[in-house]
Image (cartoon, rainbow, N blue to C red):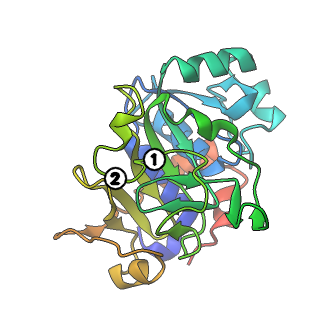
């Protein structure tokens, strides 16, 4: 498929979907329409036994064909297989029962720490966010996947102004000194420009692949810290015709992802 036949949001959903494995059990936050579409796509393709909860609403495995823009939308509860109480959701998170979680933030730094609280000085911030909310549980997930719809130096920063959710903290083995064994921290970062992972030793974010139609130089210019680019980095594999067909006919019939990231 050519880059001008799909949107960047559809590219992100397909890239996320391919990371999922059959049998995983995880959760998404409130503003998670891209991960929700990706997880439903994975269920309909290669991971039929994948399960996920929708944010604080607790809806398990919504079988939607019309993608809602929030995982807390009541329509997700209507067609879910089950609904957990908020107490159950918190218990699952603190007991490290979830294989993964998808989270975003106002800022994401080079070590995968996430800020959803304040930008600027704490006493007089430039921007005040919703707070830590579910990010406080990032030590209770086996792995974390980060995503953002806006790839810019203001979002991907050298150091977050406030750690609402802990990634690899200061890098190296610092996270293992704070969190219990089994909580592996952030694994991937998905943006409109590419996919990123973390160096296994330094835990510094690095480029894994560039979305088709983008360049390494473009990604570096849009990132607020020095971005390592390992040798051999190439393009993110494009969506196949089958993936786009399933995504558009059985997951997102109203074209929410096409409208969000208009085709280039």
Residue 54 sits above or below residue 217 on the image: above
**Mark 1 Cα within 10 Å, few/some/many (few <14, many 20+)?**
many
| Left or right of 66 on screen, residue 214 | left
Residue 78: percent from left, percent from top = 79, 25
| Left or right of 156 on screen, residue 209 | left
- Front one among 195 and 42: 195
Residue 227: quarter of image: bottom left
Q: Judging from the image, what secondary structure is the residue with disc 2 in?
A: loop
- Find the residue positioned furthest to the front: 123
Tell me if residue 1 can be seen. yes
Q: Residue at x 31, y 53 (%)?
A: 203
Q: Judging from the image, what secondary structure is the residue with disc 1 in?
A: loop
Q: How many marks?
A: 2
Q: Residue at x 48, y 33 (%)?
A: 139
What residue is disc 2 on?
171
- Front one among 8 and 32: 32
What residue is disc 1 on?
167
Whole-angstrom CA distance, mark 1 to mark 2, is 9 Å
| Left or right of 182 on screen, residue 60 | right
Q: Residue at x 38, y 44 (%)?
A: 19
- Front one among 44 and 220: 220
């Amino acid at each position: 498929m050519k880059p001008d036949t799909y949107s960047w949001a559809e590219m992100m959903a397909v890239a996320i979907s391919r990371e999922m494995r059959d049998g995983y059990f995880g959760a998404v936050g409130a503003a998670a329409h891209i991960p929700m579409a990706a997880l439903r796509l994975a269920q309909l393709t290669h991971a039929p036994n994948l399960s996920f909860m929708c944010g604080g609403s607790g809806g398990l495995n919504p079988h939607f064909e019309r993608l809602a823009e929030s995982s807390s939308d009541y329509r997700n509860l209507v067609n879910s297989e089950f609904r957990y109480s908020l107490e159950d959701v918190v218990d699952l998170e603190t007991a490290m029962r979830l294989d993964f979680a998808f989270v975003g933030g106002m800022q994401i730094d080079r070590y995968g720490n996430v800020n959803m609280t304040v930008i600027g000085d704490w006493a007089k911030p430039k921007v005040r966010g919703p707070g830590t909310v579910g990010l406080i549980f990032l030590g209770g997930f086996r792995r974390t996947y980060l995503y953002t719809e806006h790839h810019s130096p203001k979002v991907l920063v050298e150091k977050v102004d406030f750690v609402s959710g802990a990634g690899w903290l200061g890098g190296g083995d610092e996270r293992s000194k704070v969190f219990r064994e089994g909580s592996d921290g952030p694994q991937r970062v998905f943006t409109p420009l590419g996919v990123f992972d973390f160096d296994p030793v330094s835990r510094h974010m690095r480029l894994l692949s560039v979305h088709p139609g983008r360049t390494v130089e473009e990604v570096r210019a849009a990132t607020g810290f020095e971005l390592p680019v390992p040798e051999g980095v190439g393009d993110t594999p494009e969506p196949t015709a089958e993936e786009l067909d399933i995504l558009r006919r059985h997951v997102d019939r109203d074209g929410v992802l096409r409208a969000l990231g208009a085709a280039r």
